[in-house]
Image (cartoon, helix red, strand yellow):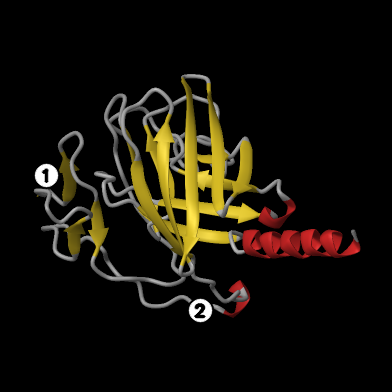
């Protein structure tokens, strides 16, 4: 009897050790994701059998906590239950393969699955902001053309124009990305939006500062100036449309 009990305990310990490898932050690539939106996943306490964490792009780019989690036979299963105007239930499944996550995303009632892979997010050194010094300003837009910019999706035609020192685009135009890369930075941007406009400024392929025509509305995590679905601006500084 003692031998049997010892064998069971040892086997459980091995399972928990493997489950712990799911913990951490993961950058996710989705080959069939047409808009190339940023996806990432954070998992904590997987070895407890009750993992907690968050996922980006469960619903329209929001930061969502998963409602259920389980690990069986080496497969992680996360469930997101939609709310409000997005009531769908989403299933995220993944296995660890050579240190990477290989998984699928499936929405109940929708056809097909999206395959994805995840790699561990890079760890950044913490820097004391007081020790940073401002560098020479760099103009990202020269006021004449789109030099220094490229389309996020290289196969797409750029539908942005420049006139009188201002860029403009047609609805659903491909996102633009700077050709230069930056580390710590301060970004100054000026923009004007038309009625019912919805846009944004993407940072590090991971975060979005929301640009929205919402003059007179109370600040919220999806409003103008918000770090989308994460940080509410201290005030709504929007001007009326076209200003």
Q: CA distance from mark 1 to mark 2?
A: 37 Å
Residue 163, can we see it? no
In this picture, residue 155 sits left or right of residue 12: left
Please name the residue that numbered disc 2 is placed on. 133
**Residue appearing at x 29%, y 49% in the figure:** 36
Number of other residues with Cα within 10 Å of mark 2, as a class: few under 14, some 14 to 19, many 20 or more: few
Residue 187: image x %, image y %? 40, 60
**Residue appearing at x 74%, y 59% in the figure:** 12
Number of other residues with Cα within 10 Å of mark 1, as a class: few under 14, some 14 to 19, many 20 or more: some
> What SS does tag 2 mark?
loop
Residue 223: image x %, image y %? 47, 34
In this picture, residue 80 sits left or right of residue 1: left
Residue 65 occupies which quadrant of the picture? Answer: top right
Residue 48: image x %, image y %? 74, 52
> What SS does tag 1 mark?
loop
Please name the residue that numbered disc 1 is placed on. 159
**Mark closer to the chain start, 1 or 2:** 2
């Amino acid at each position: 009897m003692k031998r049997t009990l010892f064998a069971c305990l040892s086997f459980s310990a091995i399972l928990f050790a493997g489950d712990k490898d799911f913990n951490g932050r993961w950058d996710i690539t989705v080959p069939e994701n047409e808009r190339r939106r940023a996806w990432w996943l954070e998992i904590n306490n997987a070895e407890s059998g009750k993992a907690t964490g968050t996922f980006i792009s469960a619903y329209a780019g929001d930061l969502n906590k998963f409602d259920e989690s389980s690990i069986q036979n080496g497969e992680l299963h996360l469930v997101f239950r939609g709310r409000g105007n997005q009531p769908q239930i989403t299933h995220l499944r993944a296995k660890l393969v050579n240190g990477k996550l290989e998984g699928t995303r499936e929405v109940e009632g929708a056809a097909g699955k999206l395959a994805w892979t995840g790699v561990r997010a890079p760890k950044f050194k913490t820097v004391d902001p007081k020790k940073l010094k401002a560098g020479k300003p760099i103009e990202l837009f020269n006021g004449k053309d789109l030099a220094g910019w490229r389309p996020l999706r290289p196969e797409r035609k750029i539908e942005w124009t420049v006139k009188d020192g201002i860029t403009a685009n047609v609805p659903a135009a491909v996102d633009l990305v700077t050709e230069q890369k930056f580390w710590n930075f301060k970004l100054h941007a000026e923009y004007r939006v038309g009625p019912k406009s919805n846009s944004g400024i993407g940072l590090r392929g991971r975060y979005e500062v929301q640009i929205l025509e919402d003059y007179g509305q109370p600040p919220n995590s999806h409003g103008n100036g918000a770090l989308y679905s994460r940080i509410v601006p201290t005030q709504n500084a929007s001007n009326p449309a076209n200003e």
